[in-house]
Amino acid sequence: MIRPLTAADRAVHLDMRGRLWSAPRNEHEAELGALETKTSFTAFGAFAGERAVGFAEATFREFVPTIGVMPAVYLEGIWVEEGYRRRGIATALVRAVEAWALLLGCSDIASDALLDNTDSQAWHRCQGFAELNQTVNFAKKIRPDP
């Protein structure tokens, strides 16, 4: 079953985030706390009975430079527990994000994958995403942090 994640799901949502993105739990708590207050953010969970086995997070963006579309929904992250993969759960999560995007009036969703994560790139292609470009991003600090 796929459904929006709620405040009651926060602990399992944080656990799943920690399995996808390696950051300390307190950083996930702070980030999720900030995101949950925004109407431009959504998260869906995949459940096998009462057990959470996957999630997807997405944001509404006014502009996504890589696709040149205004506005669009960005699939920020998606994860399915290893024992539940290849069962259509990730596809169902993407479909939930697509339905949310359509409700917001968006005709496109975007996502990304790291250059060395060929599994993620292959998964995106299987989901119908088209590769637009490959980039290496740079930044240069010109003023020290206050």
Image: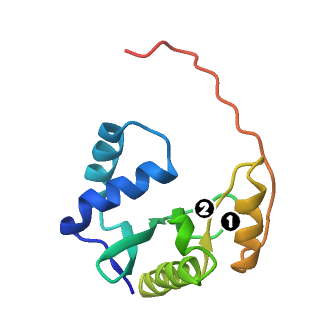
Frontmost residue, 84 versus 127 = 84
Drawn side of residue 104 relative to residue 68, left or right: left
Question: Can residue 37 be seen by looking at this rendering?
Answer: no
At horizontal 77% and vertical 72% (from top left) the residue drawn is: 130
Percent across and percent down for residue 90 are: 56, 76
Secondary element under disc 2, as helix, strand or loop, is: loop
Secondary element under disc 1, as helix, strand or loop, is: loop
Frontmost residue, 64 versus 37 = 37
Frontmost residue, 145 versus 22 = 22
Image quarter of the C terminus: top left
- Residue 72: image quadrant is bottom right
Drawn side of residue 145 relative to residue 76, left or right: left
Q: Which mark is residue 116?
A: none
Percent across and percent down for residue 45 are: 38, 74
Q: Is residue 10 above or below residue 108?
A: above
Q: Which mark is residue 68?
A: 1
Residue assigned mark 2? 64
Identify the residue at the far left of this view.
Answer: 8
